[in-house]
């Protein structure tokens, strides 16, 4: 089994690599130390900085979203806030960096930029894939073997947004592809799967980030609190590629691929996940990128060194939802199909 980050050149102590991701559902907290605010900088946009304000502070300036509304939860208390705000990166990616009038323990349940549409009209330039690319069909052999489509290019009926009854408007169908269109949180399958094979093709936007989850439930604020993730990333353009365990095809934050098998922006990638009992494999473009035994001693060693070490439910399930991650960037999925398997060893 490969070790975590086996070909990394090192991990600086001040990296703070999962600091300050204050998107919907996450608790707002002050920075932990020097260097934390550097996390927001994208590789090709170093001038776009994260400016985090401590709890109780008032933001005074915005370059792209002067006024925002938020629904904030603190225990059993819900309240609405309308405040100036700063955003990091592109405003239309709704990467919340700071909002005024916040208190310790607040969680943002919903965030709306009051001039969001005006920004999209004035400067939006999202790529749109052509309908000829969005093919969702089983082969004759797949049909005979018992595969079935989780998305047919016309309906989202087999999916719903995390902790919601239906898919919200952050996700939709673009020319036959399942697409992250705006902030909406993760989406999950209505059905749960234990032993199965999943095949899906993905295409990521420039400098984009997303992921594919398996064996997750809705006990936490997002899928990453229980399910584990196969990373979807633009390795050439996204800052997260500096960590080998965060590159495309990785078992996110746990195992790094031994080499880069991803295809670049503008091309489709083929992901294949095999889960049978505790044995799991991730494949990207016909190359294995991660292999592990869930719950084993080796797995626990990786877990204890990961960002998930304080999440007791992480990786504890042997059956759960399949999910697609909203990580603020546009991403397309097509030809999502699954094959249920009886228990047994993972094929070699």
Image (cartoon, rainbow, N blue to C red):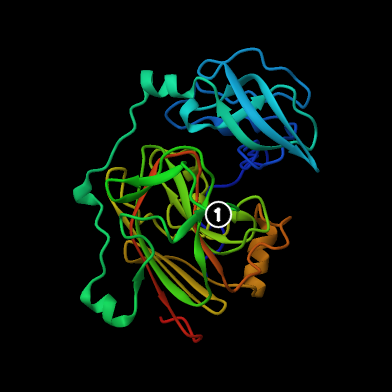
Q: Residue at x 47, y 45 (%)?
A: 241
Find residue 219 and report its horizontal and vertical position in percent: 68, 58
Find residue 328 and report its horizontal and vertical position in percent: 49, 39
The residue to which callout 1 is attached is: 165
Mark 1 Cα-neighbour bin, 10 Å: few <14, some 14–19, many ≥20: few
Q: Answer with left or right where residue 25 lies relative to residue 90.
A: right
Which is more toward the observer, 48 or 35?
Answer: 48
Q: Is residue 111 visible?
A: yes
Q: Residue at x 75, y 23 (%)?
A: 101
Q: Is residue 90 visible?
A: no
Find residue 20 and report its horizontal and vertical position in percent: 65, 35
**In the picture shown, does residue 62 fall above or below 40?**
above
Residue at far top of view: 60
Q: Residue at x 74, y 55 (%)?
A: 310
Which is more toward the observer, 296 or 232?
Answer: 232
Find residue 265 and report its horizontal and vertical position in percent: 31, 43
Q: Answer with left or right where residue 14 lies relative to residue 258.
A: right
Quarter of the rendering containing residue 144: bottom left
Q: Residue at x 63, y 23 (%)?
A: 51
């Amino acid at each position: 089994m490969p070790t975590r980050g086996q070909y990394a050149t090192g991990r600086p102590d001040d990296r703070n690599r999962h600091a300050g991701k204050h998107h919907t559902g996450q608790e707002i907290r002050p920075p932990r130390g020097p260097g934390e605010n550097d996390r927001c900088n994208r590789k090709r946009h170093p001038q776009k900085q994260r400016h985090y304000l401590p709890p109780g502070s008032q933001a005074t300036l915005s370059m792209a979203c002067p006024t925002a509304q938020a629904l904030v939860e603190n225990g059993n208390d819900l309240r609405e806030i309308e405040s100036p705000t700063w955003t990091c990166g592109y405003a239309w990616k709704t990467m919340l960096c700071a909002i005024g009038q916040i208190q310790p323990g607040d969680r943002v349940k919903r965030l709306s930029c009051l001039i969001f549409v005006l920004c999209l009209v004035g400067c939006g330039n999202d790529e749109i894939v052509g309908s000829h690319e969005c093919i969702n069909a089983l082969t004759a052999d797949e049909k005979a073997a018992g595969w079935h489509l989780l998305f047919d290019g016309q309906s989202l009926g087999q999916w719903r947004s995390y902790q919601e009854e239906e898919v919200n408007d952050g996700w939709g169908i673009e020319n036959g592809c399942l697409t992250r269109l705006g902030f909406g949180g993760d989406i999950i399958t209505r059905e749960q799967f234990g032993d199965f094979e999943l095949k899906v093709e993905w295409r990521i936007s420039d400098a984009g980030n997303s992921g594919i989850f398996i064996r997750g439930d809705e006990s936490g604020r997002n899928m990453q609190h229980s399910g584990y993730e196969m990373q979807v990333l633009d390795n050439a353009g996204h800052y997260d590629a500096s960590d080998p365990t965060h590159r495309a095809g990785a078992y996110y934050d746990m195992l790094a691929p031994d080499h880069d098998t991803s295809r670049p922006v503008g091309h489709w990638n083929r992901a294949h996940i095999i889960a049978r009992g505790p044995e799991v494999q991730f494949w990207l473009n016909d190359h294995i990128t991660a292999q592990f035994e869930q719950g084993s001693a080796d797995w626990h060693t990786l877990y204890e060194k990961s960002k998930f070490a304080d999440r007791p439910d992480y990786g504890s399930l042997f059956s759960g939802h399949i999910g697609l991650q909203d990580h603020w960037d546009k991403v397309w999925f097509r030809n999502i199909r699954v094959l249920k398997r009886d228990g047994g060893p993972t094929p070699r």
